[in-house]
Every structure is written in structure tokens, then in C-alpha cells.
Image (cartoon, helix red, strand yellow):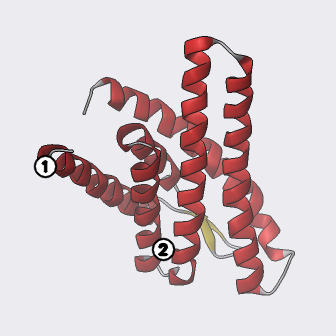
Amino acid sequence: MSTKTNTKKLTYMALIIAISVVLTFLIRIPIPSTQGYFHPGDAVLIIGIFILGKKNGSIAGAIGQGLADLIGGYAIFAPVTLIAKILMGLLFGVALENFAKYKDDGHKTHLISAIALTLLALAAMVGIYYFAEVAIYGSWIIPLVEIPINCIQFVFGIIVGSIAGRLLKKQRI
């Protein structure tokens, strides 16, 4: 890889991190029962996957959301966010690769795999947060409130992030 390519990649990673921090930190819909919040950070992570690929996009989006946890008063969740969002992003990135294969060759196994991996990405993210909240709150019940909200945030992130990511990728930024 050339120095120019590395510089461009690092610049885009820094931009995804910064946008993720700002949007996750500033645009919050509180969830009073768990003190958590809904945010658009997952959409930025998905945009990062389109621009940087599954590995670098996932890392940048996760770091941004983790930093938002740190500066936003949710430091206990920062490591959980890093793990949950990196895993979610990697799985969804593989799902996108399978969907691209389906578009190329029309084999339904690629489409089924893409759907299954997307659902696995959702389950991984929701599961990681659920069990972390069980440990933090000492209750198996309280974290149940977060599950539908995490699902909605995931779906919102996939839809908005995929639309914006495709548009940005077409611009060859």
C-alpha cells in the first residue's frame, strides 16, 4: 500500500470516528428505565463499512461510539460498545459481501447467507449489551427494555447507513 493510500485510509477513519462521536453524543433519545439512549451512531458505522471496508469501518465506527460513551457519562459501557459494535460491523460487512455475490451470480444461498449474517450481527450486538447490562444492573429483567430499542437502532443504522454509504461510495470519496 502506498503512503498516499494509507494517509487517505487514516483520514477517512479519523473522519468516521469524529462523525460517530459527534452524532452519538449529540443526538440522543433517552431510555429512562435503563439510563441508556437511542442514537444514530450505527448508521455512521455502516457508512464506514461502505467507505473503508468491513474491518476498518467497523473499528472506526466502534471507536467513535466508544468515545461518545466515555465523554457522555457512560464510561462503563465503552468497552462493551467497542466489542459489540466491532462484531456487529464485521458480521454485517460479511453480509454485504454475500449480498454482492448474490447480485453478481443470483445464487439464493448468497442471499440467505446475507440475511442470516445480518440477523447474527443484530443478535450479537443485542446479546452483548444484554449480558453486560445484566452484570451492571444485577437484573435479568431491567435490560429487557433495551432489546427492542437496540433492534430499532440497528435497523435504523442499516437502512440509513446503507443508503448514505452507497451514495458516498458512488461518489468515490
- Furthest residue toward left: 4
Q: Is residue 15 above or below residue 93?
A: below
Q: Position of residue 105 (x, y in %)?
A: 60, 12
* Three-letter amino acid code of the residue under disc 1: Thr
State the residue in front, 151 or 8: 8
Crowdedness near tag 1: few (<14), some (14–19) or many (≥20) residues, C-alpha within 10 Å:
few
Which one is earlier in the sequence, the residue at label 1 or at label 2? 1
Residue at the spot 74% in from the left edge and 28% down from the top edge = 112
Q: Position of residue 149 (x, y in %)?
A: 70, 56
Residue at the spot 62% in from the left edge and 48% down from the top edge = 154
| Rendered-image quadrant of the C terminus | top left
What distance separates the C-alpha of mark 1 from that of mark 2?
32 Å
How many marks the image carries: the answer is: 2
- Furthest residue toward right: 141
Q: Image quadrant of residue 68?
A: bottom left
- Residue labelled with disc 2: 69
Disc number for residue 28: none
User: What secondary structure is found at the residue carrying circle 2?
Assistant: helix
Q: Is residue 3 above or below residue 60?
A: above
- Residue labelled with disc 1: 3
